Amino acid sequence: MYLQRQYQPGRKWLARLPFESDLLGEIEKFAAEQNIKVGQVKVIGAVKKAVLGFYDQQSKEYRSLYFNKPLEILHCSGNLSIKDGTPKAHLHIALGSEDGAALGGHLLPGTIVFAGEAVIEELIGPEMVRGYDLQTGLPLWEK
Ligand code: ZN
């Protein structure tokens, strides 16, 4: 493991996500408003539709997966760090459909909230900054 850093607990919020807000955008807006540089995020609730990414390791591109139907947010979690000078949320989400089947992936813009309850925890310590990683083609933590 590298880029090992230790953090102390900071502020912690419970917050409700607005009806028809963009899930990813709302979390990033909150992080920017509260000036959260490093943190962790958990969300449960439901969405009206979802856009998820699957990273193609050969082409080094995200394939977008569109689900235009109501789904439960079974689990959504990830972290907050800095990319291009602003707080960036990296979230993965597991969604449940009406027959109870699960699907999931990397959360992309376009996932629209029906109802959502978030737990956001700030971590106090050094900044984590994302930059382009040549091996994977992903914006990974680099400093
Ligand atoms: Zn991801």
Image (cartoon, rainbow, N blue to C red):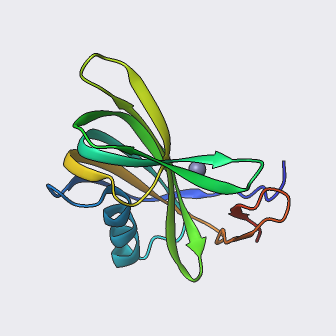
Most extreme residue toward the top is 99
Up the image or down, 31 lies above or below 19; here it is below
Give how far across and how far down residue 107 sits, in percent: 46, 50
Left or right, residue 115 beside residue 94 = left
Up the image or down, 114 lies above or below 37; here it is above
Camera-side residue of 36 and 68:
68
Quarter of the rendering occupied by the C terminus: bottom right
Give how far across and how far down residue 78 sits, in percent: 51, 49
Up the image or down, 73 lies above or below 34; here it is above
| Residue positioned 59% across, 81% down in the render | 84
| Residue positioned 25% across, 43% down in the render | 47
Give how far across and how far down residue 109 sits, in percent: 39, 61
Most extreme residue toward the bottom is 85
| Residue positioned 60% across, 54% down in the render | 62
**Splitting the image into 4 quarters, where does residue 32 fall?**
bottom left
| Residue positioned 57% across, 57% down in the render | 8
